[in-house]
Amino acid sequence: MSAKLPGVSNSYSYGLYLIAGLVPWTAFSSTISRSTGIFLDKKNIISKVNISLPSFPLYIVLSESITFLITMTFYLCFIVFSGHGISKQYLFLPFIFCIQQIFAYSLGFLLATLTVFIRDIKEFVGIIMQIWFWFTPIVYVRTILPEWVFNLMEYNPALYFVEAYQKIFVFKEQPDFSKLIILTIIGHIIMFISYYLFKKLEKDVRDFI
């Protein structure tokens, strides 16, 4: 796609912008969606083998991380061949991805526990992820939005990591570390809640499965 973005000289700037948000979002949303029903999907194993249940969403995180790494390799090749160039800001990428996947794992683990008792959550999550995608500036630039929507989007946690990738890949700028710190705190709070709830309900989770 050869559309241009303001402030970016590369003729493929919109393509760079789109993929910079789409690749991490895919890893994030797939981790949550796959984790939501993981306990039900693996009930044959769980009912026969005394295995740690929190490890199942973790395997999904690792799987999505490998896919992300492969996809990102192709993306970096495109960046180089398009003449956009590589900057030192790329060193922040592993840090951002870890924060993103901690957040995804925490949400996925929480939803996986709840889905055992409320089976419809799995279908509901698919709808929410679609709405969440369009509420995140991936296929459009945030500055085109009305002011009230622009301000409302500040409460979207996915914006924090998507915007960080876009700043690094497209604009060659440092990410907003204050937002990444907030996302880190949110991710760890949800992880604590998820683990606490799971420990309280672990016996019931195994029985209901």
Image (cartoon, helix red, strand yellow):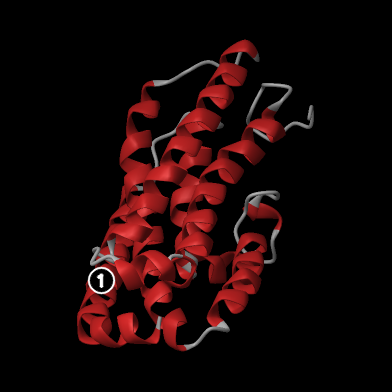
Q: Residue at x 47, y 18 (%)?
A: 86
Residue type at mark 1? Ile
Q: Looking at the image, which is closer to me, 145 or 63?
A: 63
Q: Residue at x 38, y 35 (%)?
A: 93
In the figure, residue 8 lies in which quadrant? top right
Which quadrant holds the C terminus?
Answer: bottom left
Q: Residue at x 60, y 59 (%)?
A: 136
Q: Looking at the image, which is closer to me, 42 or 129?
A: 42
Q: Residue at x 32, y 69 (%)?
A: 48
Count residues near mark 1 (Cα–Cα under 10 Å), then give few for <14, some for 14-19, many for 20+: few
Q: Position of residue 178 (x, y in %)?
A: 31, 54
Q: Is residue 200 above or below residue 33?
A: below
Q: Position of residue 172 (x, y in %)?
A: 48, 28
Q: Looking at the image, which is closer to me, 129 or 12?
A: 129
Q: Residue furthest right?
A: 2
**Mark 1 highlights which residue?**
189
Q: Secondary structure at mark 1?
A: helix
In the figure, residue 127 lies in which quadrant? bottom right
Q: Position of residue 46 (x, y in %)?
A: 34, 69
Q: Is residue 85 above or below residue 152?
A: above
Which quadrant holds the N terminus?
Answer: top right
How many numbered circles are shown? 1
Q: Looking at the image, which is closer to me, 204 or 142?
A: 204
